[in-house]
Image (cartoon, helix red, strand yellow):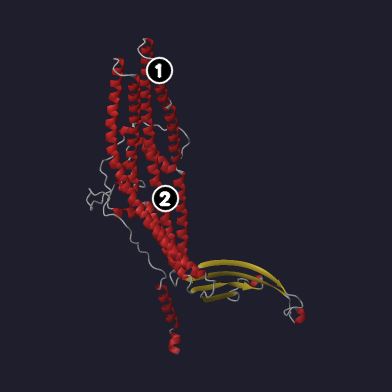
Amino acid sequence: MKKLHQYRYIIFLLILWGGISCRTGKNYQRPDVLLPESFNPGVHAADTNSIGDIAWKNYFSDPVLQLLIDSGISRNYDLQFAIRNISIARSQVKQAGWLWYPQVNAGLSGQYYRNSDNSPFGTNNGALVNHFNDFVASVNMSWEIDIWGKISRQKESSMAGYLQTYEAAKAVQTQLVADIAQGYFSLLMLDQQLQQTRKTLALNTDFVKLTNLLFDAGEVTYLAVQQAESQRQSTAVLVPLIEQNIRIQENGLQLLTGNLPGSVDRFVNLTDIHFNDGLTTGLPVSLLNRRPDVRASEMGLVNANAQVGISQANMYPALNLTAGTGFESIKSSNWFNIPGSLFGVAGATLIQPVLRGRQLRTQLEISRQQREQAVIRFRQSVLTAAIEVSNALVQISKLKEQENIARARTDTLSAAVSNAQLLFRNDMANYLEVITAQQNALDAQLSLAFIQRAELNARVELYRSLGGGWK
């Protein structure tokens, strides 16, 4: 027994070390997820290159679009809000790092006590005095020993929360870059539609003049004049409508870029925008590390996993070490007298929760269910990312086919307008054939611009869905 008493400190340290090594909860392991072997069957599965790795300034070459995106990254309020979340999480990580260290408090107090004369310590019961002073200056320390790894799990949780906000901010930026690019292409589409509508309006106006001349010559009825004028008015009403949409689209871009309402300067046509035809997507598994929203979802899972360890550790004993020292005296003149006024205290407390109304058990069960929810969200984010890439590839392929057909249709109908006008002047076609040809040609031109914009947007969506836009 004497030998055991001599080695009591060593035994205590061994027990403490053993407790620390018993970390509660399971270390994070990425769950299995469903991913295809390849996004594009025509690309070799070992090709790891991806357009998602290209910086946005290199992917979008138009100078005006680059300025818009740069302004959005600097001034967009949604992105600024997300960046502030990063700062908040960074402060929480710093605070979690201090959980390893003791908490130290310093105090300075002076008190005056006066007892009742009739109290056990009063003068009527034999006390010499019934009042005294007490002056105390102290420094106290409290330190929770991380026996079950609760503090390390708290630090792990804070770091995961920080990384989650960091990845979430990158996800906001990727979406912002895509929204600005697609908004810019929509603006160019409206410009092209307005240009084609004005050309058609000029043709309609010329046809109205020609019809009036033929009416004056008695070649056509007044119904032909009315039909021609009605067609011109139908085309004319499209001009202010498209101009209205242009102004609204400009304001939408200004909102994304953090600017006041106003026009957006542009110096290119929709047909001047080109992307590299190489649609390298890389390996599907790379989405786990390239897509910021997927990464944010996984960091949420890491955080939830750490919370399970914290909840489990709360059910086990907590060891707290305390110590304090300072000066105490009933006379201010002897307050800092050494060693007469010097005092010290040290202790250790082991607290085991016994009955807490099942709160701790309930919290552990909730934490486990929240971890399972985080697993579901993570797997869903991965599946969503894979489907978005696949959809973008399909859209690019099919929209290219649609554009070729629409372009051929536009050429055919443009030639038909010229032929119809020539035949009408030679009394070989009636006015309805001319009106129909002009209307069909305008519809084809507007549709072509819409398809061209949709194809550009699909390329932007592929870039975003592969994780591009935050670099």
Q: Please, is residue 213 above or below residue 154 in the view?
A: above
Query: What's the residue type where badge 1 is placed?
Result: Leu
Q: Residues within 10 Å of mark 2 (few under 14, many from 20)?
A: many
Disc 2 residue type? Ala
Q: Position of residue 58 (x, y in %)?
A: 31, 42
Left or right, 384 with reference to 349: left
Q: Is any part of residue 101 visible from this angle?
A: no
Q: Quadrant of residue 406?
A: top left
Q: Which mark is residue 169?
A: 2
Q: Which of these two is toward me, 49 or 204? A: 204
364 with respect to 200 (left or right) = right
Residue at (28%, 38%) from the top-left corner?
400
Q: Which residue carries the number 1 mark? A: 223
At x 42%, y 81%, the residue is 10
Quarter of the image with the N terminus in it: bottom left
Q: Secondary structure at mark 2?
A: helix
x, y percent for residue 4: 43, 87
Q: Quadrant of residue 157?
A: bottom left
